[in-house]
Amino acid sequence: MRWAPSLPVRPSPVLPLIATMQSFSRVLAVLVAVASVVFMGFAGVVSFGGPNWEAEARSLEGYTFDQEPGQPPIWSATRSLGEERLSPTSPLLPEVLVAAYQDRTRRAGEELQTLEGAIPRLQTNTAQLQQMQDADRAALERAFAARTTRLKATRDQIDQLSQQHQQVEADALQVEDRLKSRREDVFRLQLQYRLLEADLYQVDQNIDEVAEQIRLLEDELDKASRRQAEMDARGLPPAE
């Protein structure tokens, strides 16, 4: 039984987004609380004097503070995003700085409400995507099982064809061996045939010689018969 690896489950792209938004909403909640405490501190510091306000203004990210010359000089704050000028303007930098913190706290609260309002919708979408992912995973598992079965059938067919190839190759070797043996037999028979042809030629030569000898003997016998007839006709005794 072959081991079938489990299909990788593709993570939903919405889950990290929801986790990020939840973490960001918690950070914003802490930021709102801290901004509220800072605002209360500013309110107290404005009443009793305070630290270096210009340094505090420079350290506030996302806002720029400008001082317009005049009697008295007027401070103003501008939000970097959108370059929106905040109100109120004031000769007192702490008052403008508090307005910037209030604006930052308000925007953070709005963004927090927006994110919290988007979480239920994203959770619903996540549930739907999870269902779709489960359906896709089931379909992928079925497709993987079907391809695994097809792969096994293909491998079995390849093994069968390999065995048939080996058998055909063995049969071809046997035929080649028989052909080689038949070639040797043909060569041997051809050699024997040539030897027989040579022997037959020699026999023909011998027959010709014997025939010639017989012809000569017949001539001699014929001559002897005629001489004997002549001698008989003359009454001469036969020659001893």
Image (cartoon, rainbow, N blue to C red):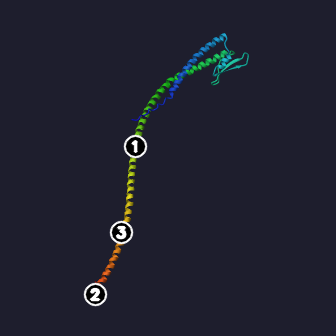
Q: Earlier in the sequence, mark 2 or mark 1?
A: 1
Q: Considering depth in this image, is 170 or 229 the residue closer to the camera?
A: 229
Q: Tell which of 159 and 170 is nearer to you.
A: 170
Amino acid type, callout 3: Leu
Q: Disc 2 and disc 1: Cα gap in Å?
A: 105 Å
User: Of the numbered discs in the image, which one, if any, rests on residue 200?
Assistant: 3
Which residue was labeled with disc 2? 231
Residue at label 1? 159
Real-space CA distance between mark 3 and mark 2, rounded to the nearest whole angstrom: 46 Å
Q: Is residue 197 above or below residue 150?
A: below
- Tell me which residue sits at (35%, 74%) in the image: 209
Q: Quadrant of residue 58?
A: top right
Does residue 89 appear in this view? no
Residue 195, by quadrant, is: bottom left
Instruction: Tell me if mark 2 has few (under 14), some (14-19) or many (20+) residues whose alpha carbon lies within 10 angstroms of its own.
Output: some
User: Sequence-wise, which precedes: disc 1 or disc 3?
Assistant: 1
Q: Secondary structure at mark 3?
A: helix
In the shown orientation, is residue 39 left or right of residue 134? Answer: right
Q: Is residue 117 visible in the rendered structure shown here?
A: yes
Is 160 placed above or below 237 here?
Answer: above
Q: Which mark is residue 179?
A: none
Please tell me how crowded label 1 is: few (under 14), some (14-19), or many (20+) other residues with Cα within 10 Å: few
Q: Is residue 30 above or below residue 168?
A: above
Question: Mark 1 and mark 3: span between their CA atoms?
Answer: 60 Å
Asked if marks 2 and 1 touch (Cβ < 8 Å), the reply is no
For residue 13, side relative to residue 159 (left or right):
right
Residue extending farthest to the bottom is: 234
